[in-house]
Amino acid sequence: MLKPGDDVDSWCGTCKLILAHTIEAMVDDTPARVSCNTCKGQHKYKPYEPGKAPKKARKTKAAASGAPRARKPRVSQYEKLLIGQDVSQAKRYSPEGTYAQGDVLDHLRFGVGVTTIVKAGSKIEVVFEDGVKTLVHER
């Protein structure tokens, strides 16, 4: 357990080296302020050379408590649109057909999708599992 007055290795910006420093102040269990034993300069404690520090892993409350972290599965827009829909009743897509917002379509190439926007003219936007597609209708 470190305490003020102990020696610790720290990066010295004046000497440009990791050298022995005397701890002047602590915050919790970590040195906060140190004094270089070589050049006598005082500065913040820096355990690593600038740019050489290992990447820190983000700690969550669960990780801090030692409990395993449970992840919530993300629900895609496609999955949200299909909630409560009867996919077996999907309309077979055809450029000659007429579709409204919320219609479930079965496209030969893209699979099952849900109409989200009916554009002016003869176009619709349909959300499929692999993304949004613009299709024609009423032709």
Image: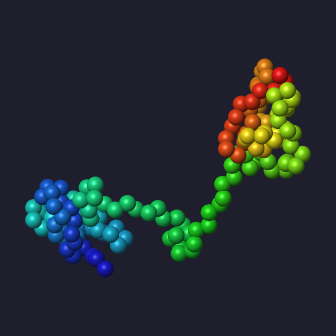
Q: Quadrant of the N terminus?
A: bottom left
- Which corner quadrant of the image does residue 132 belong to? top right
Residue 39 in view, yes or no:
yes
Q: Find residue 73 and report its horizontal and vertical position in percent.
A: 66, 58
- As drawn, the residue found furthest toward the right would be 89
- As drawn, the residue found furthest toward the bottom would be 1
Compared across the picture, whether 41 is left or right of 109 comes to left
Q: Which of the colour schemes (rainbow, by chain, secondary structure, one colour) is used? A: rainbow
Task: Please determine whether, in this image, residue 73 is positioned above or below residue 83.
Answer: below
Task: Write the residue at 86% across / 29% down.
Answer: 97
Between residue 11 and residue 86, name the one nearer to us: 86
- Which corner quadrant of the image does residue 116 belong to? top right
- As drawn, the residue found furthest toward the top would be 121
Between residue 75 and residue 129, name the one nearer to us: 129
Task: Write the residue at 58% across / 68% down.
Answer: 69
Q: Find residue 102 and report its horizontal and vertical position in percent.
A: 83, 38
Task: Please determine whether, in this image, residue 130 is positioned above or below residue 118.
Answer: below
Compared across the picture, whether 132 is left or right of 61 comes to right
Q: Quadrant of the C terminus?
A: top right
**Number of numbered discs visible in the structure rendering:** 0
Task: Write the residue at 40% across / 62% down.
Answer: 56
Between residue 28 and residue 110, name the one nearer to us: 110
Task: Please determine whether, in this image, residue 116 is positioned above or below residue 1.
Answer: above
- As drawn, the residue found furthest toward the left would be 39
Q: Find residue 49 and report its horizontal and vertical position in percent.
A: 24, 59
Task: Please determine whether, in this image, residue 71 is positioned above or below residue 133.
Answer: below
- Which corner quadrant of the image does residue 127 belong to? top right
Task: Write the residue at 66% across / 54% down.
Answer: 74
Residue 114 in view, yes or no:
no
Q: Find residue 85 and report its horizontal and vertical position in percent.
A: 85, 48
Compared across the picture, whether 69 is left or right of 85 comes to left
